[in-house]
Amino acid sequence: MDTVQAIIQQQIEAGTFLQSVQQGQQHVQQADAVNYGEEEEYEDEEGTYKGKRSNTLPIWGNQVTMNLNTLVLENIRESYYYKNNLVEIDSFQTLVEQIFYQVKHLEPWEKGTRRLQGMTGMCGGVRGVGAGGVVSSAYCLLYRLFNLRITRKQLISMLNSRQSVYIRGIGFMYIRYTQPPADLWYWLEPYLDDDSEIDPRSGGGDLMSFGQMVRLMINKLDWYGTLFPRIPVPIQKEIDEKFAERKKQQLMEEEEWQEGEGLEKEDEEAKVLPKVSKCKHHLRHHHCRKHRKNCPAKAKRWGGVE
């Protein structure tokens, strides 16, 4: 018998072998947690268990530019605010505080700073390839969050923030710019009916619900003078089908609700006593005991015999 077998035999005789195995398993689990980070269990749309989502977010597309328009990216990197304030910040919470104090809209350019004189066709307007301006603090912070590589839990905390609607807004923009197109429905579908309001336009004037904003992000490429990354055609088709299926389900639920309301209304009407008409004697002599006694049944319905 070798040394290892002798130790195991001693532990079995002492009744501590099982305890040693359990402790070893706990150490392995703790090591896995350190190596891979906390993970989130998830299911697919049919409720089938699919495993765990890592707390480390994937980055789709260009790993350096965040899929931003070249002109916007150049203006961010040359921005005084980005170079002298944000580059030095390595804390997620500090960046969120910066969003709270600095961000008032979600456009790429500050109001009135775009130089569009003489720019026509593909070089102007919504295509985002015209002359630049003063890039917004929103896009500077968005790009800094990208370089910081925020985690899944941090992104979720932004989406559900109660401190500022623009913290939430930048969270949704981060998803649209960096997450795989196949995951967009997973991220954005829970917020399609969100009635909370936000105004993404610089200077205001474009108030919308978060549900409306999320729909725009999924269905449109244009975003206030720049473009979101293009969604591959097969994935966009799947998203359109999910929208149609969702609308159909909502219509069915609304019909069921209306039917239920109709049944409740019928039950309430059935509980209401029928209206009893008073005889002519009572109409003419409602104060007279004589006619009440002569017509006791109707008198009782009308108000009782005195």
Image (cartoon, grey):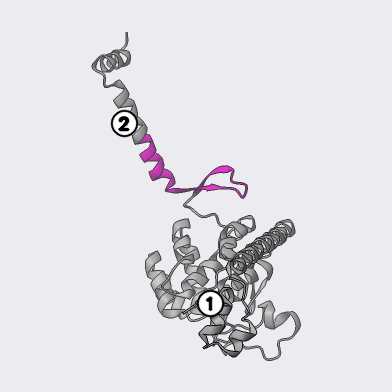
Residue 185's place in the image compared with 70, above or below, is above
Disc 1 crowd, CA 10 A, few/some/many (<14, 14-19, 20+): some
Residue 211's place in the image compared with 117, above or below, is above
- Comparing 264 with 188, the one in front is 264
Residue at x-position 40% and y-position 65%: 92
Q: Quadrant of residue 106?
A: bottom right
The picture places residue 122, in percent across and down from the top left corner, at 74, 79
Q: Earlier in the sequence, mark 1 or mark 2?
A: 2
Q: Nearer the viewer, mark 1 or mark 2?
A: 1
38 on left or right of 53: left
Task: Say which residue label 1 marks.
Answer: 197
What secondary structure is marked by label 2? helix
The amino acid at mark 2 is: Gln
- Comparing 187 with 139, the one in front is 187
Residue at x-position 48% and y-position 81%: 104
Please give the range of residues in magenta: 27-53
The picture places residue 245, in percent across and down from the top left corner, at 70, 58
